[in-house]
Amino acid sequence: MVREMTKVAVEIRGFAVHASGAQLVPYKYEPGELKANEVEVRISHCGVCHSDIHLIDNDWGTSKYPFVPGHEIVGTVEAVGSDVQDRTVGERVGIGWQADSCGVCEWCRQGAEQLCANSQPTCVGRNGGYADSVRVNSRFAIPVPEVLVSESVAPLLCGGITVFAPMRRHGVNPTSRVGVVGIGGLGHLALQFAKTFGAEVTALSTSIDKEEEARKMGADHFVNTRDMAEMKKVAGSFDFLLSTASADQEWQALMNSLRPKGTLCIVGEPPSPIAIQAFPLIGGQRSISGSPTGSPQDLHEMLDVAARHGVKAITERFPMAKANDAIAKVKKNKVRYRAVLVN
């Protein structure tokens, strides 16, 4: 096979923060030599995820400054390392939360790279996608189906896989009764995927003004979670309940809404510890689970499903140079439903 000649960037330009909570400012860095297993991707679009904001503010205590945020990346392969066989120059790819994993631990061998103890996030300890280019292990650069629009794809690469992967893992199917808690950046994608899987779908939200939109995105029913009378009506209703909201909930009421053997899966991190009664878990064989993002194989499958069934993020576009404006609007929960930066 004749390999296409490629030219790597000697300088990458982007926008970085230099201290906790600071504004993004223009920044450039030298990426060094392209590793044998890496690809360099010219970025066209990058989603603004709440995780980026946590990293900017160092909420998790893992941020090192200066750094370039961004991990919902779509772009075109511009260069490939000497060992790369699975990607080609000119190919459109998507990159999510992960840029690499060890490749040899039990989880990587099982195809669950998202659980690797030595997982390398795309923008933790390294520079991410608020830039013109980025480098990752080629296994984590996922081909994007031709029919998908890049701006709508970008949020799928973290937000989308965060809701898709647990639904697949817990076997959501046409017999399932699914509830989605929180109709925001994650929730609006969860409604679409749940409907794609053929489930009966209920949107649960405090924002009653979102009912019409939720129904258009796949919800068969809508429940105002602040209305305890409505919550009592759905007691014992759901096989699978996905909590996407990063806010405290009436957890016992949500647990009571599960059918026997039902699962409450948490993908949005609430600020306070979760307290529930044990007996409903024991008596109904109910369970609570959590889920991170997904593996490269999960990402491949999710993008294929999105392409075949028309799942797409509802986005608001910002020029890359206006990243601070996008972050400010996301912080105020003023974006419906995902902000995307465009080069």
Image (cartoon, rainbow, N blue to C red):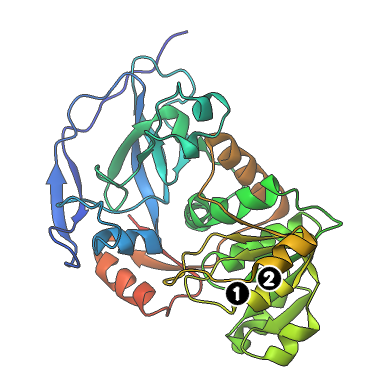
Instruction: For label 1, count other residues whose C-alpha is less than 10 Å away and answer few (under 14), some (14-19) or many (20+).
Output: some
Q: Residue at x 65, y 42 (%)?
A: 304
Q: Residue at x 29, y 46 (%)?
A: 124
Quarter residue 134 falls in: top left
The residue that mark 2 highlights is 255
Give the x, y percent position of residue 243: 59, 66
Q: Is residue 230 above or below residue 39?
A: below
Give the x, y percent position of residue 214: 67, 76
Q: In this orientation, which residue lies closer to the viewer: 52 or 290?
A: 290
The residue that mark 1 highlights is 251
Q: Mark 2: which amino acid?
A: Met
Q: In this orientation, which residue lies closer to the viewer: 105 or 190?
A: 105
Q: Residue at x 63, y 51 (%)?
A: 166
Task: Locate the C terminus and report the quarter of the image it occupies.
Answer: bottom left
The residue tagged with tag 2: helix, strand or loop? Answer: helix
Q: Is residue 149 visible?
A: no
Instruction: For label 2, count other residues whose C-alpha is less than 10 Å away and answer few (under 14), some (14-19) or many (20+).
Output: many
Q: Mark 1: which amino acid?
A: Trp
| Inter-mark Cα distance, 1 to 2 | 6 Å
